[in-house]
Image: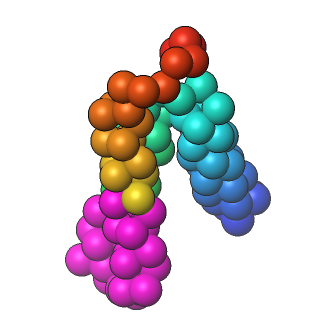
Amino acid sequence: MGLSAQMGDVGGFFMGCALMVVFGVVTLNEIWLQVAGLLTAMVAIYLIIAAAYGADLVVETILVEILITAIMLFASSRLQSAEFLEQPRV
């Protein structure tokens, strides 16, 4: 039961983040990208906290999470500054 719940939670979390990115791109609304970036940053933080409590420290995974966070925040800032877009925001 524990593995099933863990897989469901993690799968749902990352699928939800992916959908937020899609919504952000389709609607040109930067808040979706900011939220996805924030959630991904929290994953990196909690991976470090887990290592402090004895879990394996997976540096590669943490670096990927930080890279994804940076990409989301950069893309969000580009959407905020894109005044030339004519489409209405949803």
Q: How many numbered marks does the figure carry?
A: 0
Residue 53 as seen in the image, left or right of residue 14: left
Q: Establish if 48 lies above or below 26.
A: below
In the orientation shown, which residue stands out farthest toward the front? 84
Q: Who is closer to the viewer here, 44 or 8?
A: 44
Residue 9 shows in this picture = no
* Quarter of the view holding residue 76: top left
- The residue positioned 31% from the left and 34% from the top of the image is 81
Query: Which quarter of the figure has residue 21?
Result: top right
Task: Pick the residue in front: 12 or 85.
Answer: 85
Residue at x 34%, y 60% (from the top left corner): 70
Q: Is residue 48 above or below residue 73?
A: below
Q: Give the vertical position of 70 relative to 30 (above or below).
A: below
Q: In the rendered view, how is the structure colored?
A: rainbow
* Part of the protein shown in magenta: 42-70
Q: Quadrant of the N terminus?
A: bottom right
> Image check: 68 left or right of 9?
left
Q: In the displayed structure, does residue 84 sit left or right of residue 81?
A: right
Which secondary structure class fits the magenta region best? helix
Q: Position of residue 28 (x, y in %)?
A: 53, 29
Q: Nearer the viewer, residue 53 or 35?
A: 35
Residue 6, placed above or below residue 75: below
Percent across and percent down for residue 78 are: 36, 43
Q: Residue at x 24, y 77 (%)?
A: 52
Quadrant of the frame with the C terminus: top right
Whether residue 76 appears in this view of the structure is yes
- Tell me the quarter of the picture where residue 22 sits: top right
Q: Is residue 77 magenta?
A: no
Q: Position of residue 87 (x, y in %)?
A: 57, 18
